[in-house]
Image (cartoon, rainbow, N blue to C red):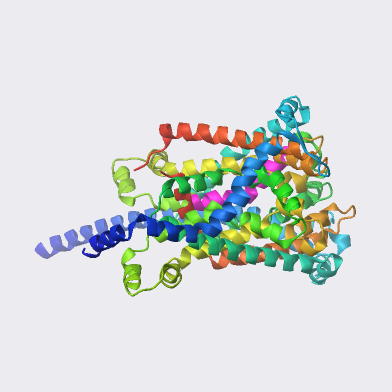
Amino acid sequence: MNSAARALASTQEERGQLAREASLAAALRKRRRIGALSQILLTLTVLIFMVPVIWMLSTSLKPRAEVFSSPPRLFGSTVMWSNYLAIWSYVPFGQYMLNGFLVAILGTVLVVASSVLSAYAFSRLRFRGRDALFFVFLGTLMVPQEVVVIPMYLFMNAIGWVNTFQALIVPWAFTAFGTFLLRQAMLAVPMELEEAARVDGASRLRVLLSIITPVIRPTIAVLVVFTFVNYWNNFLWPLIVVNDPAHTTVPLGLSQFIGQSMKPWELIMAAAGVSMLPTVILSVVFQRRLVRGIAMSSGLGGR
Amino acid sequence: MSPAPTIAARRGRRGVGGEGRAASLFLAPTLGGFTLFTLLPIIGSLLVALTVWPLAGTPTFVGLANFEKLFQDGAFLNSVVITLIFVVVYVPLNLVLSLGMAAWISPRIKGGSIYRLLFFIPVVTPMVANAVVWQMLLIPGGALDSISLAVLGRHGPNVLGQSSSALAAVVVMSLWQGFGYNLLIFTSALSGVSENVLDAAMIDGAGSVRRFFSIRLPMISPSIFFATTMTLITSFQVFAQPYVLTSGGPNSATTTVVMYLYRQGFQYLNLGYASAVGVVLFVMILAVSGVVFLLQKRWVHYE
């Protein structure tokens, strides 16, 4: 009797346990189903979002006669890898790429060098009018390049810089953004590190280069990526200040493809794809740091 | 913490003068470049705007005549209206889209960073390359047209050939290109919202919609303010998209203020007039950001 009751009780308990587990599992399953559905929808959204890029790649590998085939096909009758070779001789695209790299790399070096120095002054040194000066600096972030292109062009004309690399590089190398970004990073570096070195007689420049700079390397990487991307993609300024192939950068070169009456679309798409590679590679490699850098620069809008 | 007072003491002994001299050395490159290439051009744009300045020839001072002419210039006023339509449609859509996607790609989604990276790619690729790809999708005979022919049995609309849809195409292309940046800003802001507060609200019976609008949104309002301001400023600068996609047409339906500035300056060679356009653009940007800044007290919460 006793044992029978105990057996009954235990089975009831087990049943309760089972029921609870079942409902929990059902809830989990439901949540997982919604999660899976959400994942599938998101993947579809990304695929639709990527259609222009996919179409660009697909067209870049088609024979010219099949670019506008109807109905549209993802793949042509043959895969024309040769399109990617043809762009280098159809226009001096290799020259444009070299010019682009030269401008973007030298520009980035200049921006990082000047920003490291000025960020040190704004974060470590005390001098009269520092905060007012920094405020003026930040204020000019509000002035877009477009507003000053006319006087800048007249300036370049006056000093004989039209159609030169320095005209593409120098005017945009002293913006407030780099100084601001690196100053924020330097403020977070503890003073103790450098005080010891200063006591040992190291110069300020030495302290900056061998102690502070290595610590803020992640932020410098962010500045490098942002600056490189800006120089590489800039279109309006090269369009204005440069009109010979020897100084043409990649976006300007691409826009010249477009100006032709019979557009070689498969070559334009191959060139567009190649023009995207450097900045895409940079952002894939520096993905995590970029996200942090964007979060940091958005602190600019805060107090 | 003993080092702090010693630093302060040594600071005091060294005095402000010594640091001022060091600061001027560290600041020299940036301040020199900044004065030459940022401050002077800003002042220059005001001065050039007061002249008639042909590209080849001597400038004459004309006072405010350029501005008087601008406000009676139908083509200019048209470009202002088009830019304002672009801004009013593009900015809210960009913010809603990027915020919505940031909320969707929550930590529960697997591989969220890969999705975000894919959405971010058009942000770093050259605008000219992006626009030329979209042009190929949208022109008669392009992908949209031939898909319509294959599926519906008739030609698709000539999107870039009609005034209203051409501007819509510029907006959609710009959204595709630009929303990935704000997506990253909002992702990092949302990840900073405290889980404890959200859990407390859930226990009090707040549903997920309520939690989003009553907790998440107010808590990330500083980031929304930053993204709004930056997106506003950049959207007033829209140039490469209409330049490549539609050449400002049809019938000037996509000629934005910056396109008008470029045409006046470098196709009609009226540099003084073009500079006046730049000044008006700057005043517009300043006014709109000023309004956003004044309104922020009503809805931006700082902790």
Horizontally, residue A40 falls left or right of residue B72, namely left
For residue B227, above or below residue B22: above
Q: Is most of the magenta stretch helix, strand or loop?
A: helix
Q: Quadrant of residue B61?
A: top right
Pinpoint residue B299: horizontal percent, then vertical percent.
Answer: 42, 34
Q: Is residue B237 visible?
A: no
Q: Nearer the viewer, residue A30 or B3?
A: B3
Pinpoint residue A164: horizontal percent, then vertical percent.
Answer: 75, 60
Residue B167 forms part of the magenta stretch? yes
Residue A255 forms part of the magenta stretch? no
Residue range corresponding to the magenta coloring? B165-185
For residue A159, above or below residue A110: above
The residue positioned 79% from the left and 54% from the top of the image is A255
For residue B161, above or below residue B19: above
Q: Residue furthest left?
A: A2
Q: Quadrant of residue A12?
A: bottom left
Horizontally, residue A227 falls left or right of residue A126, namely right
Q: Quadrant of the C terminus of chain B?
A: top left
The residue positioned 44% from the left and 45% from the top of the image is A132
